[in-house]
Image: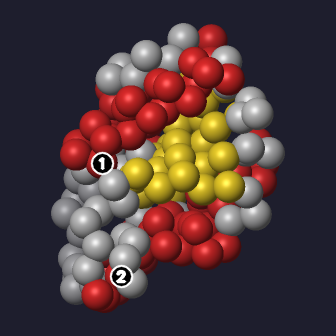
């Protein structure tokens, strides 16, 4: 049923990752699926837009940022019980929603499985990224809280 599972991971949110572990493990095992883990980091323009004015001289370039995030993602993947030959890991820079949706289409994901923070009125019952993915995804989305 689910041969290709996309699992976006926010490497800064340990609690969300922990919530996903049993769901990803069970879904992968039940379907012998390939699991594509994805970590997205915001572009430098977001930093500047939200109040940053001067970047530190040692601020990593895009390629270095991707390497750092990919290393953090690979550490998070160790929490899951997915066979190594069924794991794909990708890190990218961009809009979280856009990168998740683009990857889902690229890999022809059967389901997107992602965590969501505790809802508030401002996020209309789902976290803003989760809500956006649910709203625009062309495939099934499983949201874990």
Q: Residue at x 60, y 42 (%)?
A: 6
Q: Residue at x 29, y 62 (%)?
A: 117
On screen, residue 138 above or below 7: below
Instruction: State the image coordinates of residue 21 (x, y, percent, origin top left).
Output: 37, 32
Instruction: State the image coordinates of residue 75 (x, y, percent, origin top left).
Output: 33, 26
Marking on residue 123: 2
Local secondary structure at mark 2:
helix
Local secondary structure at mark 1:
helix
On screen, residue 83 above or below 10: above
Q: Residue at x 42, y 46 (%)?
A: 9
> Where the N terminus falls, by quadrant?
top right
Mark 2 crowdedness (10 Å alpha carbons): few <14, some 14-19, many ≥20: some
Q: Inspect this view and state whether residue 21 appears.
A: yes
Asked whether 79 or 26 is in front, the reply is 26
Which quadrant holds residue 32?
A: top right
Asked whether 69 or 39 is in front, the reply is 39
The residues tagged by marks 1 and 2 sit, at their Cα atoms, a distance apart of 16 Å
Asked whether 115 or 51 is in front, the reply is 115
């Amino acid at each position: 049923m689910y041969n290709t599972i996309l699992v976006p991971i926010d490497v800064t949110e340990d609690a969300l990752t922990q919530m996903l572990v049993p769901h990803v493990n069970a879904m992968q095992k039940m379907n012998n699926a390939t699991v594509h883990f994805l970590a997205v980091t915001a572009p430098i323009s977001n930093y500047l837009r939200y109040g940053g004015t001067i970047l530190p001289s040692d601020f990593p370039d895009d390629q270095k940022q991707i390497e750092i995030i990919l290393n953090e993602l690979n550490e998070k993947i160790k929490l899951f019980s997915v066979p190594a030959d069924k794991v794909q890991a990708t890190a990218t820079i961009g809009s979280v929603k856009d990168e998740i949706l683009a990857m889902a289409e690229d890999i022809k994901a059967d389901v997107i499985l992602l965590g969501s923070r505790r809802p508030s009125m401002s996020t209309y019952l789902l976290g803003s990224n989760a809500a956006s993915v649910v709203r625009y995804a062309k495939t099934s989305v499983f949201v874990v809280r």
